[in-house]
Image: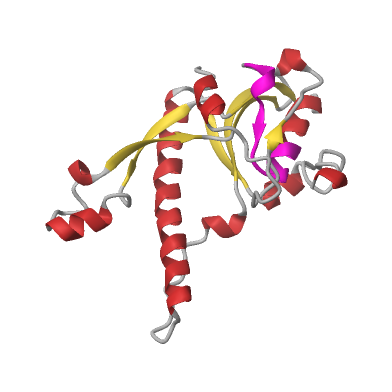
Amino acid sequence: MAYNQSYKKWHKPNMSETARTKQGYYKPKNTDKYIGDPNLIVYRSSWEYSFCKWCDFSPSIRRWSSEPVKIPYYDRISKLDECKKLGLDPNNPKNWVVKNYNTDFWVEIDKGGGNIEKWFIEVKPKHKLKKPMPPKQNASLKEIKAFNRSAKEYIINEAKFAAINEWAKNKGCKFFIFTEDQLIKFGIIGGRFELPQKNK
């Protein structure tokens, strides 16, 4: 498994006050559990920080890594306007763009009874997984633009998740999306793994 160090060196966390989410570098206590450079453990939200801390301290996590691999996927959206202008078929794969998806985490988890599994994890709010509803006929321009952004993100995420799911299966791993529901279920948020209040 590649550890994607070059991606994290070029895509540094946005640690400015204007960042939409809390981002930074997680400093592990149990460095022997981490696969890759422990100085490049990136979290791009407070939920991802909590996930890092859970991986660091949970006895069920044997090994883990952040943004460990890049997976190619087909982006059908980027050249959509160009296809319309040139009269090209947007459903033809030749007119799609190959991009890379960097999934959030990889973990090796001990489920008990000698059952060890390897998971790729994407941390994502569950509202991001819902298919956007088209705006009403009398919708404002602002509402239409918001729908277009959400629809594009939804389509791209579908392509990303399909690509990593297939890739993970071929590697003998599983892929899961952790929304707030799974994060609460595993005790990752709402407890001792959360980002300190002063840093939120």
Q: Position of residue 145 (x, y in %)?
A: 43, 69
Span colored in magenta: 37-50
Q: Furthest residue to the left?
A: 87
Q: Position of residue 115 (x, y in %)?
A: 67, 22
Q: Furthest residue to the bottom?
A: 138
Name which quarter of the figure residue 39 lies in: top right
Q: Position of residue 167 (x, y in %)?
A: 42, 29
Residue at 69% across, 46% down: 182
Residue at 14% across, 54% down: 88
| In the image, residue 46 above or below residue 144 | above
Q: Furthest residue to the top?
A: 32
116 with respect to 174 (left or right): right
Q: Does the magenta run of residues contain 47?
A: yes
Residue at 13% across, 56% down: 86
15 with respect to 27 (left or right): left
Q: Nearer the viewer, residue 144 or 55?
A: 144
Q: Nearer the viewer, residue 101 or 22?
A: 22
| In the image, residue 96 above or below residue 127 | above
Name which quarter of the figure residue 64 lies in: top right
